[in-house]
Every structure is written in structure tokens, then in C-alpha cells.
Amino acid sequence: MLVWPAVAFAEPTAEAIAVNVDQAKLVRLPTRVATIVVGNPLIADVTLQTGGIVVVTGKGYGATNFIAMDRSGEVLVDRIIQVEGPTDQLVTIYRGVDRESYSCMPICQRRVTLGDGESYFKSTIDQAGSLSGQASGSASAAAKPTN
């Protein structure tokens, strides 16, 4: 005699959510969703918003899933998330085994892409962080009242 567990699980739907790495997509779920579980948070992040809206953000290449449950633990949704590469005009340069990526729309600029060489990746991230810090500092200074 075969006994099935009393718990009902939602079947994954055939419709995968496709999102590009470093981009976000809004997905509407049932409004009673209370908990989200992501299979591999290194591939995608899923953030629950009010009204049953989730923000799916591609973080790394590949596929994972997310499960949405209500307050009683009932599985409402089990969906696959497919994270794909960038869609802009990407130029990849190889220097031996090191890789550099550039977004060329219309002028080529450095673009941080997973898989780039470590020194290129780090220097690009450092420059972006420095620029962001400078912009934040300028905005804070401009917002302070002068006497």
C-alpha cells in the first residue's frame, strides 16, 4: 500500500520567469503571499512587495526557482527563474585568460560582467563606488542649509 503525505505541493509551472543579469522584473502573485523562498539567491533575488507584487532581480547566470507560500504554509506558486546575459551591445576582450567587458551603446564604456578578470572587475567596481560616493557626498552637501 502506497501512502501519500497529507501536504499538497504546487507543481512548478511551465512558464519560467526570464530576467537579465543586473536587471529586475515585476511579477504579480496572489495577494495572500506571505513568504518567499529562493532556491539559489546567488542567481536571483525575489523581494515581496505589497499587493502580491514581487521584484525578481537577476544576480548571476543560470536557473533557480522560488516558492511563494501563504501564512499557513500552503504553497501558492513554484516558478522557475532563468537569468540570462546582458542584452546591450556587449564587446568582450580577452587578454590571455583575463576577460574585459564593454557596453557599446553607442560608445564603448567599461561594464562589470560576471566572469571578467579579477583585476578588471575590481578596478571597475572601485571606480563606480568612488563615483557613487562622490555623488552622494555632493548631494548631501547641497542639501545642507547654509547659515
Image (cartoon, helix red, strand yellow):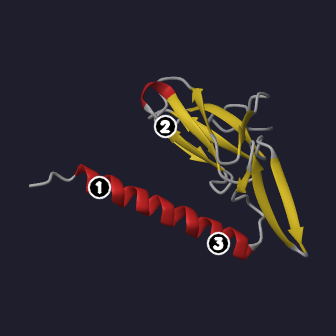
Instruction: Measure the alpha-carbon separation of dots 1 and 2.
Output: 30 Å
Which sits in the foreground, 21 or 92?
92
Three-letter code, disc 3: Lys
Element carrying mark 3: helix
Q: Is residue 67 left or right of residue 99?
A: left
Q: In the rendered image, which quarter contains the N terminus?
A: top right
Element carrying mark 2: strand
Furthest residue in direction left, as rendered = 147
User: Where's residue 74, x and y in %?
Assistant: 54, 33
User: Dot 2 surroundings within 10 Å: few (below 14), some, or many (20 or more)?
Assistant: some
Residue at point 27% right, 57% down?
A: 141
Three-letter code, disc 2: Leu
Which sits in the foreground, 46 or 125?
125
Instruction: Measure the alpha-carbon separation of dots 2 and 3.
Output: 31 Å
Residue tagged 3 = 122
Which sits in the foreground, 45 or 120?
120
Residue tagged 1 = 140
Residue tagged 2 = 48
